[in-house]
Image (spheres, rainbow, N blue to C red):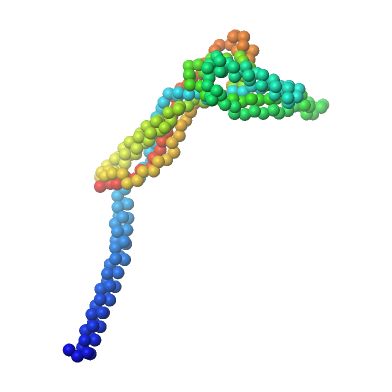
Amino acid sequence: MNAKNHRMIRMAGLAALAAAILLFGAVTRGAPEIAHAQENGEQHDTISVNAQGIVSVEPDVAYIHFAVEARGKTANEAQRSAAEIFAGVEKVLLETFKAAPRDIQTTGFSVYPEYNYTEREGRVLVGYVAAHSVRVTWRNLQEVGRLLDAVAAAGANRVDGVTFGTEKTDQYELEALQKAMAAAEAKAKVLAAAAKREVAGVLHIAQGSVTSIPLYVEKARVAYDLAASGSAPETSIQAGQIEIRATVSVVFKMR
């Protein structure tokens, strides 16, 4: 074989190799597009549902909000008076009801001027008001009413409300989530049956909000003189129930 024929054969081989490389590149570039098309096709065989689970439980803790308000001609006088009254209230909580110091929390303290308005004199300063607001965490729900009466008799002259809650929130949240998932599966099965299909599994789960809805006893005023004299009936507080709600979004696969 002469040199010219050898060069022609070699060039033909290189051309064939180049064509094979180009063909392989085209095939590999096309593969993801085929897979993507298959994935898109599978998305048409899914069901997306939202569901909620609700757990109703008995509360096991009460948060009692009340305050001591005292008046004086000066800010210092009002503040001293409030401190003296609150010392008596705190003594009742610690000694009579055996409340833990950590469960008695000051939520606000303020001293502000008090004015009287008349057409003749306009705004006239009549003194100062000191307010010491407290939150008490109380777990003996049977004694909430008795505790309110006792602190009122000791000098607490404002009750801002009672909130009932639970200290087992994590446990009840899990139960609510289980109910939410069961509700989601039930919805998906109904929808799949309507399409003459069956649920084949879960593809995606997204947890939504988990909320605890406490019961709240509205703000009230406690009359010190009635509570102290014993002429008023004992305060009755009903705890009721708490709702723990959880939501989920689930994507199911159909077959």
Residue 210 visible to an observer of this rendering: yes
User: So how many labels did they put on this image?
Assistant: 0
Residue closer to the observer: 117 or 102 = 102
The residue at the far right in this view is: 120
Q: Is residue 211 above or below residue 9?
A: above
Is residue 147 toward the left or the right of residue 83 in the image?
left
Q: Quadrant of the N terminus?
A: bottom left
The spot of residue 48 in percent (x, y) is: 35, 45
Q: Residue at x 47, y 27 (%)?
A: 165
The residue at the far left in this view is: 1
Residue 222 visible to an observer of this rendering: no
Residue closer to the observer: 18 or 228 = 18
Q: Residue at x 78, y 27 (%)?
A: 124
Q: Residue at x 59, y 19 (%)?
A: 90
The spot of residue 45 in percent (x, y) is: 30, 49
Residue closer to the observer: 151 or 197 = 151
Quadrant position of residue 208:
top left
Quadrant position of residue 126:
top right
Q: Is residue 235 above or below residue 176?
A: above
Is residue 139 toward the left or the right of residue 65 in the image?
left
Q: Residue at x 35, y 46 (%)?
A: 204
The spot of residue 139 in percent (x, y) is: 48, 21
The spot of residue 74 in percent (x, y) is: 75, 24
